[in-house]
Amino acid sequence: MIRVERRAHVPMTLGIAASIVAASVALIVTALLLGLAGTPTSAIGRLMLSAAFGSPATIVALATPLMLIGLASVLTFRVGLINLGAEGQIVAAALTALAVSSGVLQVPPLAIVPLAIAAGAVSNALALALIVVLKLRLRVDEAVVTILLNIAMLFAVQLLTGGTLASLPPIGAVQPLPIANAADLPGWGQDLHGVLAPLIAVIACLMSFALLRFTIWGLEIRATGGNTVAARFAGVRVNSIKLKVAMFSGLLIGLVGAGQAISTAGGATPNLVLGLGYAGIAVAFLAARDPLGVIPAALFVSVLLTAIGAANRETGVPLALGNVVVATLLIAALMAHGSIRYRLRFRSWSEAP
Amino acid sequence: MMSGLSGALGILADAAFWVAAIDIATPLLIAALGAILCGQTGMLALGIEGIFTAGALAALLSVHFGKGLWTVPLVAAAVGALIGLISGTLTSPLQLPQRTTGLAVALLTTGLCQLVFGLQFAADAPGTLPSGPIDFSWIAHLPAVATLTGLPYVGEFGRAVVGAPPLLYAALLLALLASYVINRTPLGLALRVSGENPSAVTAQGRSVHGLRIGASAVGSALMGLGGSALVLTSGAFSFSQLSGRGFAALMLAIIAGWRVGRTLLAVLAFAMVDAYQIHLQHRLGDPVALTLSPLLPYAIAFVILIATSRSTMRRFPLSAD
């Protein structure tokens, strides 16, 4: 007789194996779809390899926002909040940062860039706080609201820039923003941004890991997400924890949007890379909702998207292939990590209880 | 701007306004019925945006490959049912978190649609139906209809309703059928109980998973059908036109607390606001001030969603994940 039993404890090696299985599924699907879309078989391997090992700078540049969004998603999921709205929040933070940098403030030019980035991050933290308050006070479903706000933000910039409407545009597509970037980031500033942003992302992941694993706040966060009722019964201030974690993750997402908008050349129309908000959710689940896992997961997704972008430029494969790959990765990661919570136990009839 | 209230009310006597409103409402209503069916069994169908698009693309492709008008909605419904079967299996027996899976399904299906569309129509003419929108003008010339619309006091609304495409009547019939099945049959009772108290269904010896997968398949078939209705009435397929419609249908069904009658009213109100802003744009020649007006119906519905959420959630709590 075969029984399906819930595991009391999932070993870490099994979790890593599940992530590797999910990643392999995504890799195979990417290769298959590239082939079906007309990429020659010989080119598929070359594209993937050159994406992975060709230019580390490109991979890191794309992995940085994925890491920050992935970490933000991990943290909110860990306290039982489902924020599916990173996509729209990036747009909102970018617009806020551009509005601040557009010359409304009489401050020295050197202070404008940090101020604008801070404004984007803080405003987004407040936006997420509002969503959590709406959830806790009015029982608003945060997943529905955040996904609707994604659409609203996207439609707004698409309408203002005269583009066609797309609620779930191809991942990697470029969307111009309706506000020009007035803050001129000097060359050394752009170099600094290129170094500082990945550093901040990695440090945020490491610190969040340590916080969750080794501190009393981490225990309270894990308890809140694991069993809210029990946590509240044990004296954890559940709502306050949810609010704080949501604000911190909003801050991280805001950094992505503001950073992307401000780091473009001064006077130019900034472009946002679309779809990273959704890819970040896939990163979070590929990382098994663990802050440390976010780093390799973001690097992996970055390689996949880079390969698809290269295939798009070389052979004209539609960018929408990225959506299919990211969605497949998300489902595969959910299934892999869902299934390892259980195990099969083989017993003879006589042993069965 | 319009000259105040009389101008705003005057639009109600405009036939084009009612035709537009009905064209907007029909696909939304059919898709919202699908969302209701899922919602009653405790499933939040976030994949609706993708399934709606998939139904529309299926309709376009089946017309493109020369299928008749009766096969088109069937193909769209079959595509929807297939996606619903898969997503229902993922969320019910396999217990994946509903909202994240729903988002993944939406991403996956819209991505596949964009892929297929990009590959099929890359060089070809974009997605207009070769036959144009379905022509229902013969209905207006039927003797009975002509007499009816010729009567005094019928008004533009009446003329628009009587001359409306049969798809509207199909949608209303589907709404009646859905309402009957959900509220008046043992199956409907089982569906509702599987949403409110799944263990009670199990205690009766029925399968919650079976009910949910079934509801997901039939509901998604309706969502696909809604997408095909949009293509058939407008005679064209564009992602721009489809975008956001699926989520709008879901939002309206949630506002209505998964009840058919209220959803019908919500859909009609949404369609009227949308038709009104389209009318304003045409009337005023696309001025800059109205750039964001397509967001208006969504914004109003969104505010209502938040304002009513406390009372709807008390009666119809959504699942936690």
Image (cartoon, coloured by chain):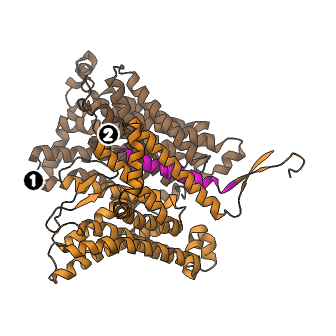
Chain colours: A orange, B brown
**Residue under label 1:** B1
In terms of image quadrants, where is residue A280? Answer: bottom left
Tell me if residue B30 can be seen.
no
- Please state which of residues B174 and B295 is positioned toward the viewer in this rendering: B295
Residue B217 relative to residue A177: left or right: right
Q: Amino acid at mark 2?
A: Ala
| Quadrant (top left, top right, bottom left, bottom right) of the N terminus of chain A | top right
Q: Which residues are magenta?
A: A316-342
What residue lies at 72% left-to-right and 47% top-to-bottom? B203
Residue A75 relative to residue A21: left or right: left
Residue B32 location in percent, x, y?
41, 42
- In the picture as drawn, the residue positioned furthest to the top comes out as B143
Tell me if residue B77 can be seen.
yes
- Name the dominant secondary structure of the magenta segment: helix
Q: Secondary structure at mark 2?
A: helix
**Residue under label 2:** B25
Q: Amino acid at mark 1?
A: Met
Q: Give the numbered dot on residue B172.
A: none
Which chain's residue wears label 2? B
Q: Secondary structure at mark 1?
A: loop
From this view, report whether residue A165 is shown above or below residue B61: below
What residue lies at 42% left-to-right and 70% top-to-bottom? A249
Instruction: Assess disc 1: are there few (<14), some (14-19) or many (≥20) residues with their C-alpha within 10 Å of its C-alpha.
Output: few
Reading the chain from its start, which is encountered first: label 1 or label 2? Answer: 1
- Please state which of residues A77 and A339 is positioned toward the viewer in this rendering: A339
What residue lies at 40% left-to-right and 39% top-to-bottom? A42
From this view, report whether residue B160 is shown above or below residue A273: above
Residue B230 location in percent, x, y?
32, 35
Residue A73 location in percent, x, y?
45, 64
Residue A320 relative to residue B316: left or right: left
Say if labels 1 and 2 share a chain: yes
**Disc 1 + disc 2, Cβ < 8 Å:** no
